[in-house]
Image (cartoon, helix red, strand yellow):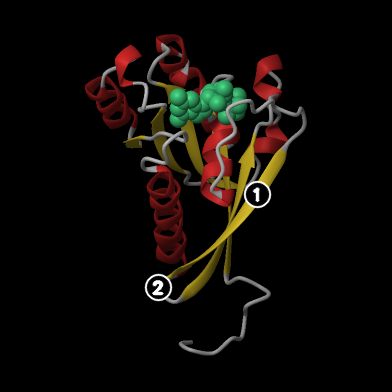
Amino acid sequence: MGGGDGGRDSPEYLFKIVIIGDSAVGKSNLLSRYARGEFDPHSKATVGVEFQTQCLEIDGKEVKAQIWDTAGQERFRAVTSAYYRGAFGALIVYDISRRSTFDSVSRWLDELNSHSDTTVAKMLVGNKCDLEDIRDVSVEEGKKLAEAEGLFFIETSAFDSTNVHKAFEIVIREIYDNVSRKVL
Ligand code: GDP
């Protein structure tokens, strides 16, 4: 329905999206940059799961994305199945200046896949692309891995905002397309 204000309190779609990846790759900062427009150089993870919601409109439909941050659980290798449950989208994040975080991507993907029983829209995110001087993983390597695993790929910077909105919005759009394809 165009123009009316009905449905403002209850979105037509509610999508859960999880952010995963090694510690300190910038997961919390990507989320706060996207949801609140903030970057916190001294961010310290609070243990316990946290999520933020973001509302947007796609094809005239109100969509609410509920985006979960591990909030430090991954430090203890204790990301629980409850974290993954019901997720329709995932951002798998590494730090382009730290190769070990890129090497961990397949482990995160295995974990995600073992917990999901539905189609999950997945985006591989090479964060901290502002740190070009100390780059440790090339753009081509990121692209190649994404292609091999059937993921979207993007490089972002939570620090200077590069591609942050785009990363989340591509995932949200893909979930919307997956869901509406199923409904039709
Ligand atoms: P998390 O543990 O994956 O949630 O990572 P955080 O969001 O807590 O970030 C870890 C550290 O990396 C913090 O010191 C951030 O300030 C820094 N950081 C996060 N994103 C970026 C980025 O895009 N560029 C740069 N240069 N630093 C970042």
Q: Secondary structure at mark 2?
A: loop
The quadrant of the picture occupied by the C terminus is: bottom left
Q: Residue at x 75, y 29 (%)?
A: 46
In this rendering, the count of numbered labels is 2
Local packing at callout 1 (Cα closer than 10 Å; few below 14, some 14-19, many 20+) is: some
Q: Secondary structure at mark 1?
A: strand
- Depth check: give the residue in front, 40 or 88: 40
Left or right position of 46 against 152: right
In the rendered image, which residue does mark 1 sit on? 52
Residue 78 place in picture, x, y as percent: 71, 21
Residue 3 place in picture, x, y as percent: 48, 89
Label 1 and label 2: CA atoms lie apart by 23 Å
In the rendered image, which residue does mark 2 sit on? 59
Local packing at callout 2 (Cα closer than 10 Å; few below 14, some 14-19, many 20+) is: few
Residue 168 visible in rendering: yes
Residue 94 place in picture, x, y as percent: 45, 23
Q: Residue at x 46, y 33 (%)?
A: 159
Q: What amino acid is found at the position of numbered circle 1 in the picture?
A: Gln
| In this view, 1 is above or below 58 | below
Q: Picture quarter containing residue 42? A: top right
| In this view, 86 is above or below 143 | below
Ranked by sequence position, the earlier of labels 1 and 2 is: 1
